[in-house]
Amino acid sequence: MNKFYCFILIFFASTILLNAQISNSQLDSLDQQFESFQYIRVITTADSLLKLNVGFTEKQLIKIYRVKGISEYSLQEEINSRNSFRAILNIDSTYQLDSAKTSPKIISFFNSVKEKYLDDLAIRKRLNAEQEAFRNSHLIPKATPVEILRTTMIRSLILPGLGHIHMGEKSKGIILASLSAVSLGSMVYFIIDANNKENDYLAEKDPNLMGALYSDFENSRKIRNISLISFAVLWLYSQIDILFFTDFNQKTELYSEKLPRFNFDSFRGVQLSYNFAF
């Protein structure tokens, strides 16, 4: 087994060494072509090397793109030359051509490409910074369990079931809210109806009609009481279920917006009362 691992290690080491030797040989050939002004061959060889991608270092890649860009510019292929020079700047944005080995005209062209590249880079950085700042400014912190409990309870106090819907328990919430709305509507209707029928009964002077009016009043009063008890049971169940059977630590993952603050001060001093006979 140890011999096998040694063989694998030697194989990979040999492969890496061989690739390095091949790449150095190819780069030397590229240099010779460039020095002898064989610009078309330089471009062809450079493209082949870049396609092979045999693990060139950044320095070697810059060298390939440099001779390729200069050759393309010499053949008046300015668009391709610009792309080659930009590839250099993608590797090293501070790179400069050697004035001792490059004509002033090519250096001027490279510098114009570099200036445009740096301007574009600055714009991209600024846009990225603005986008990041925008995202950060619009990130709304997750609600804490206390905030969720408070908002859920406020909704549930208004109408049983609304708190459950707010927590994501839609099925239970819709059922509770529907039953509560029916009970509340029935209660309000029969409170008014019972009061009217009670007034009609008390105002009636004819003994023959008083019995029927009292029977209507009693029926309305019973339905009113049943509706009130039903709503009270639903309301109490909703609050107990939220307070004692809900894990608000798990619910924090469901929220990505700040929960609204409820101003209890506006309700100070307000008293609601309604008297009716059971």
Image: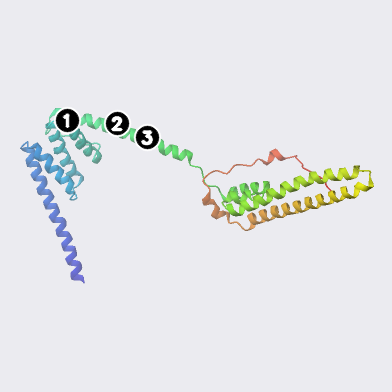
Around disc 3, counting alpha carbons within 10 Å, would you say few (fewer than 14), some (14 to 19), or many (20 or more)? few
Q: Which residue is mark 2?
A: 119
Around disc 2, counting alpha carbons within 10 Å, would you say few (fewer than 14), some (14 to 19), or many (20 or more)? few
Q: Position of residue 30 (x, y in %)?
A: 10, 43
Q: Look at the numbered discs 3 and 1 and tell me whether their residues touch, using CB distance below 8 Å.
A: no
Disc on the earlier residue, 3 or 2: 2
Q: Alpha carbon of mark 3 to alpha carbon of mark 2: how far?
A: 12 Å
Q: Which residue is mark 3?
A: 127
Give the residue displayed 12% in from the left and 30% down from the top. Answer: 103
**Residue 224 left/right relative to 140:** right
Task: Label 2, secondary structure: give it.
Answer: helix
Q: Is residue 181 visible?
A: yes
Give the residue displayed 68% in from the left and 56% down from the top. Answer: 237
> Mark 3 belongs to which amino acid?
Leu
Q: Quadrant of the N terminus?
A: bottom left
> Mark 2 belongs to which amino acid?
Asp
Task: Label 1, secondary structure: give it.
Answer: helix
Q: Position of residue 69 (x, y in %)?
A: 16, 36
Q: Which residue is mark 1?
A: 107
Direction front: furthest residue: 208
